[in-house]
Image (cartoon, rainbow, N blue to C red):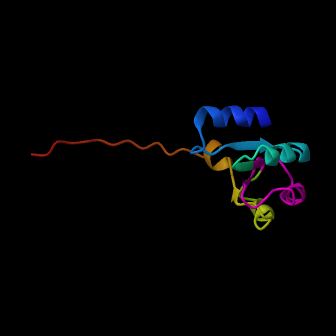
């Protein structure tokens, strides 16, 4: 991971934030060592996230994602992450078909 983050930073510079997705303590440690800007916990339990947060300096923003929806978001609220993502609001939304007709007036 360290080499990949360095390659990205060399290519895009420091103005663009680098976020990595992690699913294990090992990956969290690698992300911290790589000095990423954001760490996203993917499909991690609240207990796992709390454990992982102990390893992360406050300078790195954190996000919980994966498997979080409107019925279980309360479990993640207050666990210590900076952001919570709910994918269902984009991939499971019911669409409303609207159209716009323009009628010329007299």
Q: What stretch of residues is rendered in magenta?
A: 40-67
In this rendered view, identify the residue nearer to me: 78 or 7. Answer: 7
Q: In x, y percent, where is residue 70?
A: 71, 58
Position of residue 101 in the picture relative to residue 2 (left or right): left
Q: Quadrant of residue 50?
A: bottom right
Question: Does the rendering let one see residue 42?
Answer: no
In this rendered view, identify the residue nearer to me: 106 or 77. Answer: 77
Q: Please, is residue 54 above or below residue 39 in the view?
A: below
Q: Residue at x 77, y 32 (%)?
A: 3
Q: Quadrant of residue 62?
A: bottom right
Position of residue 39 in the picture relative to residue 13 (left or right): right
- Which image quadrant: the C terminus? top left
Q: In x, y percent, where is residue 104?
A: 16, 42
Residue 58 is inside the magenta segment: yes
Q: Residue at x 72, y 46 (%)?
A: 36
Residue 57 is inside the magenta segment: yes
Q: In x, y percent, where is residue 68?
A: 76, 53
In this rendered view, identify the residue nearer to me: 100 or 20. Answer: 20
């Amino acid at each position: 991971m360290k080499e990949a983050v360095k390659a990205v930073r060399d290519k895009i510079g420091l103005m663009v934030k680098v976020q990595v997705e992690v699913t294990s303590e090992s990956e969290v440690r690698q992300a911290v060592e790589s000095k990423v800007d954001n760490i996203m916990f993917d499909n991690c339990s609240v207990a796992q996230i709390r454990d992982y947060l102990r390893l992360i300096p406050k300078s790195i923003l954190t996000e919980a994602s994966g498997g979080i929806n409107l019925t279980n978001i309360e479990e993640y609220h207050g666990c210590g992450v900076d952001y919570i993502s709910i994918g269902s609001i984009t991939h499971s939304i019911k669409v409303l078909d609207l159209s716009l007709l323009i009628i010329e007036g007299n």
